[in-house]
Amino acid sequence: MTDLFTLDAEVRTDLGKGASRRLRHANKVPAILYGEGKAPISLTLEHKNVYRAQQEEAFYSHVLTLNVDGKPVECLLKDMQRHPYKQVIMHLDFLRIDAKHVVQVNAPIHFLNEDVAEKSGGTVVHHVKDIAITCLPADIPEFIEIDVANLEMGQTIHLSDIALPKGATADELAKGESHDLAIATLNPPKGSSDDDAEEEATEEAPAE
């Protein structure tokens, strides 16, 4: 493995739950590679290499290279099954890609300047942690940065407000205005609305 996004894989012919169980006991991860109109291939990867790679955020949206019996195949991770309580990767699904064909990925969001926005006493609330986008493999971003420094109290940033990377489109916006997702909101301090309402009611109440 030359880097975290290149993994060695072996084709496996021993299939079924029993075979997968034996692989896990041998510290290997069963996987499948499919897509691009080609037949699915069942694979085996070293658990230690997969576990180390999946600790990197970019692993989930980055173009990966699988060395399948020595032949490189570019792909994306489409699904990962984990053990419910052990630090064990149970199964991986990889999707073959072609540099000329667009792909759908979930790009993680990095929020910037939250401390600046919260100086007013409010709290920045994240409504989503990633954005589903469609683009060519070469245009897949490692993450999408959203600056919240200028958020005003009670204001919400929506998907249509986000400047996406060149060549990328937001999947939800393609469905229409009703799918303009809320991304983040600067919420006022807890209880401030109730306090203001109570104060206004007191001011408006007639003197006895």
Image (tube, grey):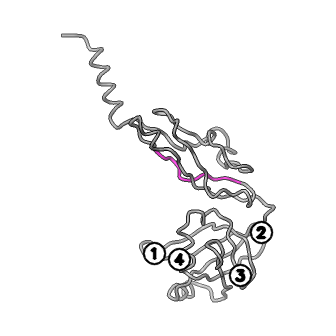
Q: Which mark is residue 87?
A: 1
Q: Quadrant location of residue 32?
A: bottom right
x and y percentages locating residue 108 in the rendered image: 58, 55
Instruction: State the residue lying farthest toward the left.
Output: 208
To which residue does mark 4 refer? 90
Q: Earlier in the sequence, mark 4 or mark 3?
A: 3
**Is 90 left or right of 70, judged from the image as shown?**
left
> Disc 3 on helix, strand or loop?
strand
> Are dots 4 and 1 in contact, CB under 8 Å?
no
Q: Amino acid at mark 3?
A: Val
| Total numbered labels placed on residues in the image | 4
> Disc 1 on helix, strand or loop?
loop
> Are dots 2 and 3 in contact, CB under 8 Å?
no
To which residue does mark 2 refer? 36
Q: Quadrant location of residue 86?
A: bottom left
Q: Earlier in the sequence, mark 3 or mark 1?
A: 3
Q: Amino acid at mark 4?
A: Met
Q: Amino acid at mark 2?
A: Glu
How much space separates mark 3 and mark 1, taking CA atoms? 25 Å
Q: Quadrant location of residue 79?
A: bottom right
Image point (64%, 47%), residue name:
172
To which residue does mark 3 refer? 68
Span colored in magenta? 125-134
Q: Is residue 102 above or below residue 86?
A: above
How much space separates mark 4 and mark 1, taking CA atoms? 10 Å
Q: Earlier in the sequence, mark 4 or mark 2?
A: 2
> Disc 4 on helix, strand or loop?
strand
Per the picture, the main secondary structure of the magenta-coloured stretch is strand
Image point (54%, 80%), residue name:
47
- Say few, some or many: other residues with alpha carbon within 10 Å of mark 4 (under 14 / 14 to 19 / 20 or more): some
